[in-house]
Amino acid sequence: MPPPVLSTLPKGRPLVLALIGATSGIGSYTARALCRTFASNPKKLRVYLVGRNASRAASILEYAKEVCPGSEWVFLEVEDLALMSEVDDVARRIEEAEEKKAFWSGEDEEGMKTRKRLDGMWLCQALSPMQESRVTKEGLDTQLSLLYYSRIHLIQKLIPLLISSPHPSHVISIFAGGYQDRISTTGPPPIGTPSPKAYGMTSVRTNVVFMKTFLFEELASKYAGKISFTHIYPGLVDGPTFYSVVNPWWARMLWRVIMKPLLSWYMTSAEVCGDVMVGLLDSVRYPPQGGSGGKGEMSTRAEPGDGAYGVGQRGDASGKVMYEGIRKEDTGKRVWEHTMGVFEEIDK
Ligand SMILES: NC(=O)c1ccc[n+]([C@@H]2O[C@H](COP(=O)([O-])OP(=O)(O)OC[C@H]3O[C@@H](n4cnc5c(N)ncnc54)[C@H](OP(=O)(O)O)[C@@H]3O)[C@@H](O)[C@H]2O)c1
């Protein structure tokens, strides 16, 4: 069953949304789900579609025209979001577009006629986990950057737009929400890029999920009452990433011939996945910190409605405190300082 909020969203206030790294896979499924959701009231929807592939973007815009005519879609082409300089650039382009013409559906909803803003954003940029991950010219591992640094940097750059609306806004990062790898209780916390010796699919996930959990908690407190932060594991969702030539031939074959048929019972369809992603805009279920009177989904600190969520493939949280055994009073601060330190170093 689609999330119930899908039937109320198009009756609510007009929304300005951004889909980042979204010309294929889950980002594109979310774009299509937005079209279906707002088909009954297209004038309530403005979307910035940010991605690398102009021809795939054109087919999403074509779908929007067909299914949700009257909704506003703007494609912003990028080359490499692993670079903070490109993140800065795309944030500036979104800001300029909002500056030029605020989104207004024709009714005078709380000064919306002049209010430049962003009501929600999905972050989807990633390499295939099997792809070689090079070091960028700014000195970051590409995969770590796409899954973490680039996403956090973009959030920071767009904060002025995200806090501009009188209503809560939603930041949604698609990767491995709620997923906790085993972490040594005696060693240093998994902050930064794994060492070359430890580097691999699991260690990347371990470090990214750890840092994102604590950074989102920090951001949720900083922007209490304003922005809600959700990190989601989308489940197993078929898409171009499994067939890409960046993967070894045997991995593509394995997926096509064995894994996909074997795991079909567990897989999430493109349509259901898109609906779940749009459902994360639910401000009652995923409110910003302090905005719900103790109601809402369990946060990563196992407090209802606490503003930072780590959820699974249907948007449900486990209800447990994440990293309970190794969480210390200053863990969030350490992750914050590391992350800001990386950005400052690149800015020099
Ligand atoms: N699909 C699954 O089963 C699954 C399972 C668990 C987690 N996830 C996570 O969900 C997220 C989305 O996955 P997906 O399946 O939708 O993968 P996908 O189809 O490969 O989408 C990734 C997107 O990132 C973009 N991208 C890659 N490198 C980029 C760069 N340097 N600069 C800007 N954009 C870049 C890609 O652009 P192009 O289209 O131009 O290549 C693509 O649009 C990822 O974080 C993934 O780890 C997916």
Image: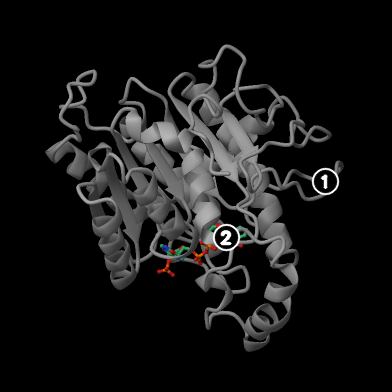
Q: Work out whether residue 194 can be spotted.
A: no
Q: At 48% across and 33% down in the image, what residue appears?
A: 5
For the N terminus, the quadrant is top right
Mark 1 and ligand 1: say if the CB distance to the nearest ligand atom is below 8 Å. Answer: no
Q: Residue furthest bottom?
A: 249
Amino acid carrying mark 2 in the image: Ser
96 w.r.t. 324: above or below: below
Q: Nearer the viewer, residue 11 or 59?
A: 11
Residue 290: x, y in percent?
Answer: 54, 15
Badge 2 local density, few (<14 within 10 Å), some, or many (20+)? some
Residue 142: x, y in percent?
Answer: 51, 64
148 w.r.t. 118: above or below: below
Q: Work out whether residue 204 can be spotted.
A: yes
Q: Earlier in the sequence, mark 2 or mark 1?
A: 1
Callout in the foreground (2, 1): 2
Badge 1 local density, few (<14 within 10 Å), some, or many (20+)? few
295 w.r.t. 159: above or below: above
Q: Which mark is residue 269?
A: 2
Amino acid carrying mark 1 in the image: Gly
Residue 112: x, y in percent?
Answer: 21, 25
Disc 2 is placed on an element classified as loop
Q: CA distance from mark 2 to mark 1?
A: 40 Å
Specify whether 116 is left or right of 147: left
Tell me how the rendering is colored: one colour
Q: Based on the displayed image, in which of its 4 quarters is residue 216 positioned?
A: top right
Residue wearing tag 1: 187
Q: Based on the displayed image, in which of its 4 quarters is residue 28 positioned?
A: bottom left
Q: At 70% across and 82% down in the image, what residue appears?
A: 254
